[in-house]
Amino acid sequence: MNDIQEYSTRNLQRFIDELADLLRIPSVSTAPEHKSDVATCAEYIAQHIRAVGIKDVTVFQTDGHPIVFAEYKSSRVNAPTVLFYGHYDVQPVDPLNLWTNPPFEPTFREGKVFARGATDDKGQIFLHIKALESLLKVRGELPVNVKLLLEGEEEIGSIHLEEFIRSHQELLKCDTVLISDTPIYAPGVPSLVYGLRGLCYMEVTVTGPNRDLHSGSFGGAVANPVNVLCDMISKLKDRDGRILISGFYDDVIDLTVEERRDYSELPFDEDAYRKELDIPVTFGEVGYSTLERVSGRPTLDVNGIIGGFTGVGAKTVLPSVAKAKISMRLVPNQQSEDIALKFESYFRFIAPPSVKVEVVHHHGANPVLTPRDSMGMNAARAALEFAYGKKAVLTREGGSIPVCLLFDTILHAPTVLMGFGLSTENAHSPDEHFLLDNFEKGIVATAAFYEEMGKQSI
Ligand code: BES
Ligand code: MN
Ligand code: MN
């Protein structure tokens, strides 16, 4: 145990209490009624960063939610600069009745903290601040220049962050970007993520007659938009799980032989996976393994479908309108805007003349592959091995972080995705939680990352 570890172990209970305070703030970015809570959360974080000894902190207002930026300048010449990115906004809590305890009243059970945002992403950004505190208290200074960029709109597609990055390139200039907003592979198995999927989110509306009709009087003569929508949805994918939208796979980069070998070497128990989800068989694109399907291949899924009579009992009606929310997870080099256009023209092409179709493109994200070897990746490898006593595995993940690609394209800095959540921690769903053991190991690993980076000069 080194002196940083000793400091964080000694202060762990206080760290956890402070994390609980952060988790009490309902910073739901998508909900207008929580706008002031999101602002309160930004201020709380800014204040906390100042309290650990980083004084240069600014809360930037945007047309949406605030961006917190902080900067620490090292006294060492030629020290590299690390830009840490994370988000303090959270997803909505519904369905509320499925939570064991209220989502914004953190509770502790089985070595976990339960609350909305615990793993995604407040627990992870807070452990980062605590790693900086530990370094500052024990060493008196940080070994590198550190910039912190914490946003309140990640869960709604980072709407205002692109413009902020474009217009603050000098402020954000760095050698390495560090993000802690991804899972580790399994409990006790640390990982570095080198790929994320992108997202293209569409909403479609299919309209038939100008009003709901008596299904006895009109049924048989008028196209039913719910039937039509289901028929159209069935044309989006074939039975082998291949997406049928014209040109959909044009820009997909195939998994390399090396990547497929790495996937096959990861410990994975298909039966346990099936049993945990209570499904008789897994299903996905023919020719790919489950791990490949959830991170290295694109998908198309209906997220929700709305239309017709859904109340208790039976009502004989031929509905006027049906809607579906459809998302596609993308892989490099697919582009969200391009896929949206391809989706729309295909969807219009398969529409029968009996209905009107409307297609709306919601926020999205582009997929990303980050370098598997870089100064930052090497520092992260050493840091994770130190904290977990085990070598990190390299993985790709299926989720999206909209801003990730911009660090490469605008700031020209490689990103390191070193996260500490678990994919089983119910992010975005009821009873979200975060394993306190990973909170603690995350602090040690993050501090070790900075110390490793401190050995480098630029
Ligand atoms: N932390 C996740 C991203 C993530 C999830 C990465 C799982 C790796 C594995 C992030 O907060 C998130 O939920 N992103 C959204 C993006 C969307 C709202 C644009 C997502 O992936 O759905
Ligand atoms: Mn997140
Ligand atoms: Mn999320």
Image: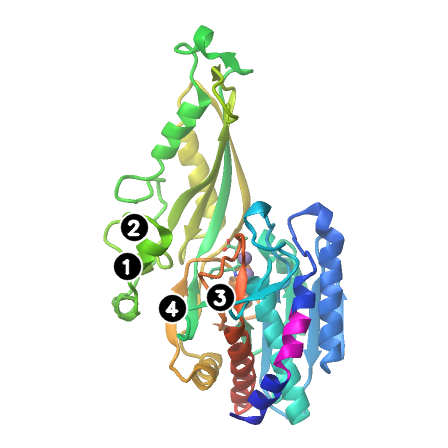
Label 3: state its secondary structure. loop
Sequence-wise, the earlier of marks 2 and 4 is: 2
364 horizontally vs 244: left or right = right
Placement of 43 over or under 143, stated as above or below: above
Residue 53: x and y, percent? Answer: 73, 83
Sequence-wise, the earlier of marks 4 and 3 is: 3
Nearest to viewer (mark 4 / mark 1): 1
Label 4: state its secondary structure. strand
Q: Which residues are magenta?
A: 11-19
Placement of 154 over or under 200, stated as above or below: below
Question: Which label was assigned to residue 270?
Answer: 1
Q: Is residue 15 magenta?
A: yes
Mostly what secondary structure, the magenta segment? helix
Sequence-wise, the earlier of marks 2 and 3 is: 3
Instruction: Give the residue at mark 2.
Output: 282
Q: Amino acid at mark 2?
A: Thr
Q: Is residue 254 magenta?
A: no
| Badge 2 density bin: few <14, some 14–19, many ≥20, Cα 10 Å | few
Q: Amino acid at mark 1?
A: Glu
Residue sitting at x 54%, y 70%: 179
Label 2: state its secondary structure. loop
In the picture, residue 296 is in which quadrant?
Answer: bottom left
Q: Amino acid at mark 3?
A: Thr
Q: Is there a contact, CB below 8 Å, between mark 1 and mark 2?
A: yes
Ligand 1 has an atom within 8 Å of the beta carbon of the residue at disc 3: yes
274 horizontally vs 49: left or right = left
